[in-house]
Amino acid sequence: MSSTLSVAPGTSRSGAPAAPDHRTSAEQRDVTVTDPSLVKRAVKAAALGNAMEWFDFGVYGYLTATLGHVFFPTASSTAQVLSTLGTFAAAFLVRPIGGAFFGPLGDRIGRQKVLAITMIMMAAGTFAIGLIPSYGAIGVWAPVLLIVARMVQGFSTGGEYGGACTFIAEYAPDKRRGFFGSFLEFGTLIGYVAGAGLATALTTLMSSGDLYGWGWRIPFLIAGPIGLVGLYVRMKLEETPAFQKLAEEAEAKQKSQPKPKLRDMFVGKGAGNAMMLCIALVLVFNVTDYMLLSYMPT
C-alpha cells in the first residue's frame, strides 16, 4: 500500500526547516532578472534611437514631390514622383543585406556596438542627402549620389531594427518582453510623425522657390546633430547581461559545433514554412504602410 508523505509548510522532506526564499516577486516569476532602472534606460535609449533612425528614413518619403523637382527636373511631374520613389525603394534592396551583416556581427562584438554603428551610418547617409548638389549643378550625378546615400540608409536600417529588438529582449524580464518591445514600435511612430510634421511645416510656410532652392535640405541636415545625440545615448548603455553571459559559452560552442548556414533558415526542418509566413506578413504590412504613409501623401 502506498502512502503520501505530508510536509509541513516551512520544512523540508527531511524535517529540517526549509531555507527562506529571499527572491523578489520578479525573480520568482522570471528566469532573467535585471535591474528595473537599467531596463528602463535600455528601452528608452533603443526607442529614442529608433525614432531618430525612422525620422531620417521616413522624411524622404514625405518630401517626394519636392525631391523629384530637385533631382529629376527634366521629367514630367508623374515621372518625377515615380523616379523619386524608385530611389526610395533602393534602400529596401539592401535592408536584408544589412540585417544579414549586422546580425552575426552583433553576436560577435555585442548589440550596443552594432546599434552605435547603425546610428552613425543612418545619420551620415541622411546628412549626405542634404549636401548633394541639385541636378542643375552636377547633372546625372545628383540622382546617382542620392541612390548611394539611400542605400547607406537602407543598409543601416537592416541592422537597426533587429538589433534594437534583440537589445530590448535581452534586457527585459522574461514575461514582459512583449510589453517593453512595443516601445520600439512607439519610437518608430514618433520618428515618422516628427518627419511628417517637419515636412508639412516646410511645405506650408516656405515659398516654392525657397523650398526647391534650399528648404528641402533642412530635414536631412538636422540628421547630423540628431545622430550625435542618439550616438551619445547609446554609448552610455552597457552591453546586455544576456550577451555578456553567453559570450564565453558561444565561443566554446563554436569550436565544437559546426557554424550554422544561412540556407538553413529557408530549407531547415520546419524553418522554410515559418520563414515564408514571416515574409508574407511583413510584406503585407509594409506595402500597406508605405502605400498609405509615403505614396498617398504625394
Image: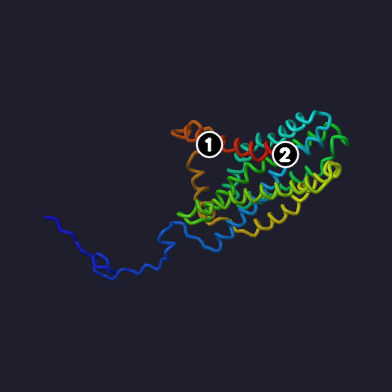
Tell which tag, 2 or 1, sits nearer the viewer.
1
Note whether residue 180 is visible.
Answer: yes
Q: State which quarter of the image contains the N terminus.
A: bottom left
Instruction: Say which amino acid is labelled 1.
Output: Leu
- Please name the residue that numbered disc 2 is placed on: 150
Give me the residue at 54% from left, 35% from top. 279
For the residues marked 2 and 1, what is the alpha-carbon distance in whole angstroms? 25 Å
Note whether residue 118 is visible.
Answer: no
Q: Residues within 10 Å of mark 1 (few under 14, many from 20)?
A: few
171 or 183: which is nearer to us? 183
Give me the residue at 44% from left, 33% from top. 269
- 258 with respect to 215 (left or right): left
Residue at the extreme left: 1
Give me the residue at 58% from left, 48% from top. 185
Between discs 2 and 1, the one toward the N terminus = 2
Instruction: Say which amino acid is labelled 2.
Output: Arg
119 or 55: which is nearer to us? 55
Q: Secondary structure at mark 2?
A: helix
Quarter holding residue 86: top right
| Picture coordinates of residue 117, whole percent (x, y) | 67, 48
Q: Secondary structure at mark 1?
A: helix
Residue at the extreme right: 137
The scheme the figure's colours follow is rainbow
| Picture coordinates of residue 214, whole percent (x, y) | 84, 45
- 179 with respect to 133 (left or right): left
7 w.r.t. 218: above or below = below
- Please name the residue that numbered disc 1 is placed on: 281
| Picture coordinates of residue 273, whole percent (x, y) | 47, 32
- 132 with respect to 238 (left or right): right
